[in-house]
Amino acid sequence: AEAADASTIFYNPAGLSKLDSSQISVNANIVFPSIRYEADSATDFTGIPVQGSKSGKITKTTVAPHIYGAYKVNDNLTVGLGVYVPFGSATEYEKDSVLRHNINKLGLTSIAVEPVAAWKLNDRHSFGAGIIAQHTSAELRKYADWGIQQKAAAKASGKPDAAIAAAIQADGHADVKGSDWGFGYQLAWMWDINDRARVGVNYRSKVSHTLKGDAEWAADGAAAKAMWSTALAANGYTANEKASVKIVTPESLSVHGMYKVSDKANLFGDVTWTRHSRFNKAELVFEKEKTIGMSKKSDRTTITPNWRNTYKVGFGGSYQISEPLQLRAGIAFDKSPVRNADYRMNSLPDGNRIWFSAGMKYNIGKNHVVDAAYTHIHINDTSYRTAKASGNDVDSKGASSARFKNHADIIGLQYTYKFK
């Protein structure tokens, strides 16, 4: 609700009407995630323990750049353009992890380009709107156990599980990449109740995507390579084929406020609702139909995360230490969209989060502003458990369970230039 610079395009584009000049803001958020996992159990489709690494740590530093520009056409109309990253996620396990028959690697990045306009109705009310063009790209790696039939036969003959696991290892894997453009919109309103209090409302629409790309299949190990050269091609597995998946990035509604306690101190609050239930099911569809055992055929892998709608509540404040320096701090509770351990994905081991943030703003003369912030995100310890695959699609995972300890740190840096 503060609308301090052009980055208000992301939070509430009606805030552009509060800027005193045309300006440009360039910033980057550097994200340092940490995921530690311990697998409690992992069996293949036949119930035999999976061989491999049972614990590990996932860390992948990510930089999310943003740029926002605002141009004051006149006292009542301001236009702007934002290029930013609204959604992003990345996890990658060791290739020998016992959880590899689940999703072994998952990455999702959305980049939005949004032209906006803000109109000042009067001294109290302003409105804003934007058109969102969003490019989303995704990649995943999933392992397939091509030795299931041999393992089942060996198990039926009475051989011990340990001997079967050591003798029959025939993993293959698919690396899948795809991308798509989708479109949505943003609507906003800002109301100055009086000289001290301001509230705002912002709605961001859903954006639908059909990610299309390629799936590259490869064999791992001598047994899988031998099968690849003989039977697998006849069963629909090829080195390269087309693949697609439909996803929807969710809509959100935010209500936020600002209160001027004094000439130096401000208080802020925000409540955001997000319709994460859009992610209730996803189907990765392959170009070629595959024989998946027991004379069944399928051309897809299905996941059912069944996410729920969520809310995030944040409070914060700022204090003007001196003419150029302002200090800020805040805290937020962010509810996880994951319902429970039975729906949690090993590639998205999310839990309820608490954000602790502190930062500063420093004015260098009249034209230059530098912002910096640090956030620590405490994430509740989580666990997951999953049953073996249904046997009706291209999925050979067995039952497994694991525990996770997660947290993340973010460093944010921003430079704003004001054209005065």
Image (cartoon, rainbow, N blue to C red):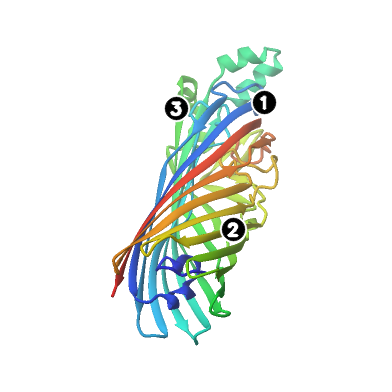
Label 3 element class: helix
Q: Residue at x 63, y 32 (%)?
A: 403
Label 2 element class: strand
Quarter placement of the C terminus? bottom left
Q: Is residue 396 visible?
A: no
- Going by the numbered disc 2, the residue's amino acid type is Gly
Q: Residue at x 44, y 27 (%)?
A: 229
Q: Which residue is mark 2?
A: 314
Q: CA distance from mark 1 to mark 2?
A: 47 Å
Nearer to us in this view, 125 or 61? 125
Where residue 143 appears, as percent x and y from the top left, is 53, 33
- Going by the numbered disc 1, the residue's amino acid type is Thr
Tell me the quarter of the picture where residue 73 sits: bottom left
Q: Earlier in the sequence, mark 2 or mark 3?
A: 3
Q: Which residue is mark 3?
A: 229
Where residue 299 appears, as percent x and y from the top left, is 57, 45
Q: CA distance from mark 2 to mark 3?
A: 57 Å
Please give the label number shown on residue 276: none
